């Protein structure tokens, strides 16, 4: 984990197709002063992505100002669900900017009322309260706070989470994360956070809910001690889902024991997985869920949605944030949600997901492709050392590098040992672009073996 792509321009093959255009060396020599300025003034942590300079992003493409165009399989980390620079989103933003109304703190605004009503109308009963925030990690912090507050009144404090989970980079979010390397900085880990094996992980041998019960029994934890269980709807690290039976048993267990079930839908919401909400795949409803990323296809806004008795625990003025429901961000979310709804983009995600399934599974013939996971428009291609199950983050990194040199944009590998290439284009993508993008991945793999 933690590699930088080199800033040494390489002569690469010129490319011009409907979806990709590469006409310069990569990285572009003229762009180096900008890249170097970023490296000089920003922390090194900001240097992990391919060194191409975004100038414009429209639909499924990202452009620099030097004449290159990339086919985007990243959605800028799963944000641009409705496509980059979506016209509905831009129009809604323009209307509010032109008033102008750029900020109103928690004072009421009509646009915030419209957005919370819209999200509530899309959420299943009894999840009808919506609290707007700014980032995904903040929603997790808020969900932890609500669950712990609810639990405290009932003398419970344990939170159960899963190995491999990623919920953001703030203290609470990382405390309920399941990636040990990311938690090393936490000098006083919370002893009441229990990490269970994630049953959806392709390497997990025992996928039954019995394992969950067995681990609780071994640790002498009873249901009455637990305040909440939190899980990503699918694990972002490699796009793996819980077995449906497991999710149903978990819901039943939570109901029986009065435990709050929290789904982190920050990646999974707004059509990404082929259903409007990711948890619809399980046929269950959580008590709280967290939203972010694709909510606006653009500006930073997020939300916690949940049951009234959990959401209403804080008195007027005591659960707020300075930028709660910023009007410009609300406008972007309304535009994006309306576009996704009117165009039923989750249906396209479902159809195009079948194309990815077909194309990516073909890549399994290469020994360095360990497993392929996903649904809808989120997929993970796990790269291993040939004939082993050992993750190969260097090869994964090289594949991503070759791809952007060929005009296909992916973000740096993630997941177990940083060896999973995530593939998650905007939900407006078509079959032709998917087939072309997958052929670029194949070409890159072939060049590396
Ligand atoms: N939850 C999930 C599932 C995520 O994938 C992320 C970010 O990648 C977060 C939470 C944190 O969101 P943010 O980066 O907006 O804080």
Image (spheres, rainbow, N blue to C red):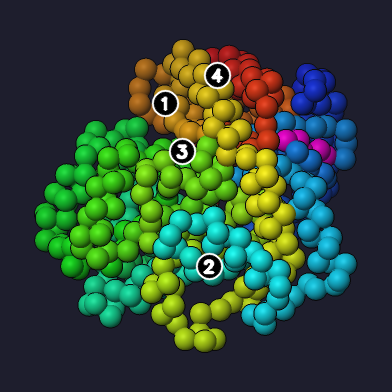
Q: Circle 2 is placed at which residue position?
A: 130
Mark 2 or mark 1: which is in front?
Answer: 2
Q: Position of residue 33 (x, y in %)?
A: 83, 47
Precedes in sequence: disc 2 or disc 4 = 2
C-beta proximity under 8 Å, tags 2 and 3: no
Above or below, 306 against 106 in this view is above
Looking at the image, residue 317 sits to the left or right of residue 165; the answer is right
For the residues labelled 2 and 1, the Cα–Cα distance comes to 37 Å
Mark 2 or mark 3: which is in front?
Answer: 2
Q: Circle 1 is placed at which residue position?
A: 371
Q: Position of residue 95 (x, y in %)?
A: 83, 63
For the residues labelled 3 and 1, the Cα–Cα distance comes to 11 Å
For the residues labelled 1 and 4, the Cα–Cα distance comes to 13 Å
At 78% from the left edge and 58% from the top edge, which residue is drawn?
92
Precedes in sequence: disc 2 or disc 3 = 2
For the residues labelled 2 and 4, the Cα–Cα distance comes to 39 Å
Q: Which residues are magenta?
A: 60-64
Q: Which circle marks residue 348 in the picture?
A: none
Is 209 included in the stretch rendered in magenta?
no
Q: Circle 4 is placed at which residue position?
A: 359
Precedes in sequence: disc 2 or disc 1 = 2
């Amino acid at each position: 984990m933690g590699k930088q792509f080199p800033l040494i321009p390489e002569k690469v093959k010129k490319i011009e197709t409907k979806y990709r255009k590469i006409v310069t060396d990569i990285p572009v020599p003229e762009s180096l002063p900008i890249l170097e300025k970023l490296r000089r003034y920003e922390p090194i942590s900001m240097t992990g992505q391919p060194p191409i300079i975004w100038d414009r992003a429209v639909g499924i493409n990202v452009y620099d100002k030097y004449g290159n165009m990339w086919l985007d399989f990243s959605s800028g980390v799963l944000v641009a669900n409705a496509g980059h620079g979506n016209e509905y989103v831009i129009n809604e933003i323009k209307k509010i900017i032109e008033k102008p109304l750029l900020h109103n703190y928690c004072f009421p605004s009509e646009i915030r009322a419209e957005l919370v009503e819209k999200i509530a109308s899309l959420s299943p009963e009894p999840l009808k309260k919506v609290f707007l925030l700014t980032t995904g990690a903040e929603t997790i912090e808020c969900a932890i706070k609500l669950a712990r507050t609810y639990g405290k009144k009932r003398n419970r404090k344990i939170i159960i989470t899963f190995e491999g989970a990623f919920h953001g980079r703030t203290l609470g979010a990382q405390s309920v994360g399941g990636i040990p390397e990311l938690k090393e900085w936490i000098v006083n880990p919370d002893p009441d956070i229990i990490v269970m094996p994630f049953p959806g992980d392709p390497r997990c041998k025992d996928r039954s809910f019995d394992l969950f019960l067995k681990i609780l029994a071994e640790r002498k934890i009873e249901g009455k001690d637990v305040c909440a269980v939190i899980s990503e709807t699918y694990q972002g690290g490699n796009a793996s889902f819980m077995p449906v039976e497991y999710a149903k048993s978990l819901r039943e267990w939570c109901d029986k024991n009065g435990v709050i079930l929290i789904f982190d839908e920050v990646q999974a919401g707004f059509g990404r997985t082929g259903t409007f909400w990711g948890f619809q795949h399980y046929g269950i409803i959580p008590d709280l869920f967290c939203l972010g990323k694709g909510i606006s296809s653009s500006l930073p806004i997020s939300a916690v949605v949940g049951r009234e008795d959990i959401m209403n625990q804080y008195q007027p003025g005591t659960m707020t944030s300075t930028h709660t429901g910023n009007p410009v961000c609300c406008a972007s979310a309304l535009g994006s949600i309306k576009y996704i709804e009117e165009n039923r983009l989750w249906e396209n995600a479902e159809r195009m997901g079948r194309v990815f399934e077909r194309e990516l599974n073909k890549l399994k013939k290469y020994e360095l492709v360990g497993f392929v996971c996903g649904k809808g428009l989120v997929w993970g291609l796990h790269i291993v050392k040939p004939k082993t199950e050992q993750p190969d983050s260097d090869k994964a990194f090289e594949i991503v590098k070759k791809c952007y040199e060929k005009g296909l944009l992916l973000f740096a590998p993630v997941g177990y040992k940083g060896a999973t290439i995530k593939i998650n284009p905007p939900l407006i993508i078509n079959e032709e672009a998917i087939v072309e993008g997958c052929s670029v991945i194949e070409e890159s793999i072939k060049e590396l073996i």
